[in-house]
Image (cartoon, rainbow, N blue to C red):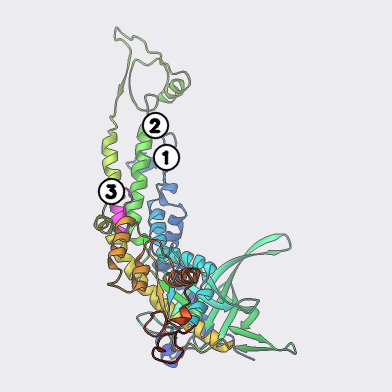
Amino acid sequence: MKNVFDFLLSEAARIAQAVTIGKDRISDEQYIINEINTFKVSQRRKDMLDGEKYYAGKHDILSRVRTVIGEDGELTEVKNLPNNRIVDNQYKKMVDQKTNYLLGQPLTFQSDNDAYAKIVKQIFNKKFQRTLKSVGEDSLNCGIAWLFVYYDDKGNLAFKRIKPFEVIPGWHDSEHTQLDYAIRVYEVIVYEGKTEKVVEKVEVYDDKGVNYFELDGGTLKPCEPFFQNYITVVNEDGTEDGFNWTRIPLIPFKYNSKEIPLIKMVKSLQDGLNLIESNFQNSMEEDTRNTILVLMNYDGENLGEFRKNLAQYGAVKVRTVDGAGGDLKTLQVEVNSENYKAILEIFKKAIIENAMGYDAKDDRLAGNPNQMNIQSMYSDIDLDANNMETEYQASFEDLLWFVDNHLANTGQGDYEDTDVDVIFNRDMLLNESEVITNCSNSVGILSDETVVSMHPWVDDPQAELERIKKEKEENMEQFGFNPALQNPQGNPQNPDEGNEGKEGAGDD
C-alpha cells in the first residue's frame, strides 16, 4: 500500500530541511505537523492576515477602549466618555488602485503564430482574467498569491485561486522559484448530526499527486479521498488511469521579489489616520454637559449625582454658603479643526507615497493637464507596477508550460517552442487628444501595428488591424476593384497590358 506520508523530496532537500533528533530523522508526519505549527505562529502569516483584515475594513481601531489615569497611576478603562472608532480605509483604496492599474484591462497575447495566440486567448478568457484580478489582490494583501492548475469535471483546463495564508511552500531554492512540495492547511465546517464542528484539513502537494489528511489533536489522520493524481482519465470501459505533471501545478504570483505585503508599508500610517479622526470626533462630542466643570457650593451629595442631574435636566442648583455665592464655571478646551485637517492631509499623502500609489485629486490634474504632468503623477505607481509585472511575467511563463503540455496531450498541437508575449494593458489616465495627435504624426514613420497599439481607443491591436484590412477590402469591392487582379507591385492589372503589337490586340 502506498505510504501517503512519503511525499517526494530530493535527498539533498530532505537532509537540509528535515528536523533531526539525535541520529534519527523525525517521521514525515511529524515534519508536516512541525511545519504547520511554525507557520501558524509566524510573523509572515500574521502579516498576511493583517492585509486581509485591513482590506475588509477590520482595523485595530475597532478594538480601542478609552482610558484615563486611575488612582494608582495606571491607565484604567472608562465607559462614560465618547469612544468613536472611525475607519478611513485608505489601504483598501491603494490595493484597488494598484490592482486595477495593472490588471483592470484585458490582457493582450501576441505571437508570430496566430493560431497559438488565438488558443491562448481562449484559455485565458474573461473568467480567468476575473480570477487573475483576485490573485492580484492576494499578492498585494499577502505578498504572494497562488493559482492551482487542474482539470474540471468536463475535462477543461481550469485555474483555482488558493488563499495565501493557507499555503506553506517548500522551496527548492533560496530565490523561491521552484517548489519541492507544498502544504495546504484550512478549516471547513462539518455537521455531526445537528452539531456544527470545525475540522482542519491538510493537503500535501508533490510531483506524485495530492495526499489528504485531517489534523486532529496534533496528529495527522488520512481522510478521503486519501490520494489523488493531478490528472485522471476515464477509459471507455469505465476504468480510470492516473497521470501527473512533471511539475507541481501550483503557480506563485508575487507582489515583489521579497514577497513583502503592502500592509507592511502603511499599517502604522493607516492606524494613525484612524486614530486622529476618532479623536477629533471624540473631542467634538465632549460638549458642556460632559466637559470639565468647576463647582462652587453645589447643592448635592456627590459628583455622580451632579452629572446625572445635568444630563437629565440640563440645569444645576447652586447655593450661597457663609456669604460665598454659588457658581458654575467651565474650562473650555479649544478644538482647532485646522490642526486636525493638516495632520489628516499629512497622513493621507504619506499613505499614498509609501504605498506607491497616486492622488487622483492631484493639483497637476487641474485645468487641462498635459501628458507629461499625468506621467509625473503616475511615476510611483508605474515603478511599483513594473516590479509586479516582472514577477507576473515569470509566473505566466510557468503557467504557459502547463498550457503547452495540455495542448500537446489533447492533440491540439505542439507549441512548446512557440513564444507568446503577455501584455498588461495598464489603466492610466491619458490626455487622449495629445496621444491621438502623436499617433497621427507617426503614420509612415512607424509600422501600422505599432501606431494602432499605442492608440488610446484600441484594446486588441491584432483585432483592430484585421478590422482595418476587412474594411479596406470591402471599400475596394464596392468601387469595383478586384484585389485578385493586382500585380506583384500592387498596381491594378490591365487585361490588355503586354498585348501591344500583337495581332488583334485591342480590336473589337
Query: Type of residue at label 3?
Result: Asn
* Local SS, label 2: helix
Query: Type of residue at label 1?
Result: Asn
In the image, which residues are magenta? 349-362
Query: Which residue in the protein does label 1 denote?
Result: 84
Q: Quadrant of residue 458?
A: bottom left
Horizontal relation, residue 6 to residue 316: left or right: right
Q: Residue at x 65, y 79 (%)?
A: 225
Of the numbered discs 1 and 3, the one sitting upstream in the chain is 1
Nearer the observer, disc 1 or disc 3? 3
Where is residue 366 shown, x and y percent of the image?
A: 28, 46
Where is residue 176 shown, x and y percent of the image?
A: 38, 79
Q: Residues within 10 Å of mark 2 (few under 14, many from 20)?
A: some
* Local SS, label 1: loop
- Confirm or deny contact between disc 1 and disc 2 (CB under 8 A): yes
Give me the C-alpha separation between circle 1 and circle 2. 10 Å
Asked if the stretch drawn in magenta spans residue 356, the answer is yes
Query: Type of residue at label 2?
Result: Glu
Query: Which residue in the protein does label 2 denote?
Result: 285
Q: Residues within 10 Å of mark 3 (few under 14, many from 20)?
A: few
- Of the numbered discs in the image, which one, if any, rests on residue 368? 3
Extreme top residue here? 323
Looking at the image, can residue 281 be seen?
A: yes
Query: Is the N terminus in the top left, top right, bottom left or bottom right quadrant?
Result: bottom right
Horizontal relation, residue 431 to residue 52: left or right: left
Q: Quadrant of residue 461?
A: bottom left
